[in-house]
Amino acid sequence: MEDIPRQQVVARIRSENSWWEAPHRIPAPDATLRPRAYLDGFLALVQALTIRRAVLLMGPRRVGKTVLLRHVVQRLIDSGVPPRRVCYVSVDHPLYNGLGLEQLLDSFRDAAGVDPADGPLYVLFDEIQHLREWEVHLKSLVDTHADVRLVASGSAAAALKPKSRESGAGRFTEFLLPPLTFHEYVDLRGRTDALFYIQPEGVRAKAVDDVNREFVEYLNFGGYPELALNPLAQKDPSRFVKEDVIDKVLLRDLPGLYGIQDVQELNSLFTMLAFNTGSEVSLEALSQRSHVAKNTLKRYIEYLEAAFLIKVVHRVDHSARRFQRASAFKVYLTNPAMFSALFTPVGADDPVTPRLVETAVFSQWLHSPELVHYARWDSGEVDLVWLDALQRPTNALEVKWTDRAFDDPSEVKPLIAFCLKHGVPRPMVATRTATGVKTVGGLTVGYLPASVYSFVISRELVSRRNEAVHAAVREIAQTQSSRQEGT
């Protein structure tokens, strides 16, 4: 049996990097797609050459990681980096089977004809989880190739994250790319100017009913760029999302990574949790319904969360304290569009829509470093509560797909009581169409449609994240510069 000739590997790398030749542009359709809002922050990490770390791009399937990498390629070329010094390699291609990252790096140099001494090289390894012991290979390259800026991406977050932290401590910088936020969804579809006034003093909806119609579309089709932009895919979201995203995670990624034997059992649990997104569940109730041991259920839920299909939110009581033995918790889909793919698309007035609205509002906060909980006690509940590092409430939000709370403050009585107890200055109520500010029991409460809130907060959070990345890069660079001057 013959090995794959090196020249075929070299030829494949050349074909994957068409921008090496004039006109030095990434190919369509990627070149014509609007970049995701996270591009600016991610690019700052890639361009931080003084930081001796590989950048690890993680996220669920089909959220646009490969397109983001190619947009990085174009930005690097536009910034003056010679095209042949930027290489993209899709590690999962059969031709690369059995090759290590060092061999792929050598093949890139041969294919491009570049000399490392002439300046930095940028190498982007896509779907790196397909390489066995990828973390060892990548760490070795970081340690031995100061002339190469290494970037890697992978969909199997369940495998990437723990290995990154165990083997790549001090060598990898993680960057999470979540499903599309509502702001990105509207922007990718070119609808921002039609729906919102964007002004220095803030964002205002032009017509709430129009924004809500777009928001319901987002609930059904919004998490994945291809689904958001492709009307044909929207006609059969089950085929696009369930077969291409969910089933591959449940049937291939998780069993392969963790040796799960009963895939049907795992799939049944996920379907049950997905249908109850935004609801409080307990291991006891799940065990009784599924006839699966609680310890096994706990492991399954950890796997599903690591695979970025669900997010577990922990409960606090009226005193904002975590329970010592938490028997109940909330589970959200990380992307409401998974619901329509598993079951059926929803309309604005479907009984399940309020829970999907809450799921969508929560999903805007997925990449935020702030700790999000929910509060529940015998006489009340608050949907989302933010705690600082000292477990003190800093903000609270009640999500309603109705305007009743705007006219009748008793609808959000638990929210008012919780915030008065803890000195939360201005809680929010997400409504269906009502906007305004009211004083309730001496407390200032803001009201904003859930759709508008999702747009505004997701736009603000990604801006904050990009700014935080730039600030962190500057701080690390200054620290390293000071150390060099000291020596």
Image (cartoon, helix red, strand yellow):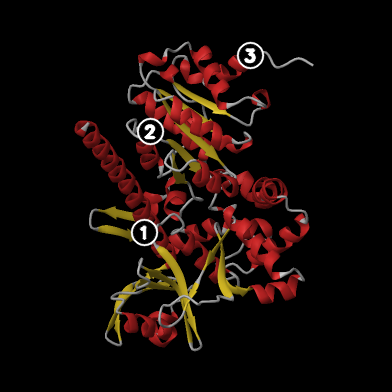
Name the residue tied to disc 1.
456
Query: Where 27 sits versus 337, above or below?
Result: above
Q: Position of residue 101 (x, y in %)?
A: 56, 26
The secondary element bearing badge 1 is classed as helix
Q: Which residue is mark 3?
A: 6
Separation of residues labelled 2 and 1 (CA atoms): 35 Å
Instruction: State the residue position of label 2.
Output: 52
Q: Depth-wise, is mark 2 or mark 3 nearer the camera? A: 2
Q: Is residue 451 left or right of residue 275?
A: left
Q: Specify which label sits upstream in the sequence, 2 or 3.
A: 3
Q: Quadrant of residue 72?
A: top left
What amino acid is labelled 3 in the image? Arg
Residue 385 position in % (x across, y down): 41, 72
Residue for point 46% across, 57% down: 366
Residues 466 and 30: in front is 466
Q: Is 214 above or below relative to 148?
A: below
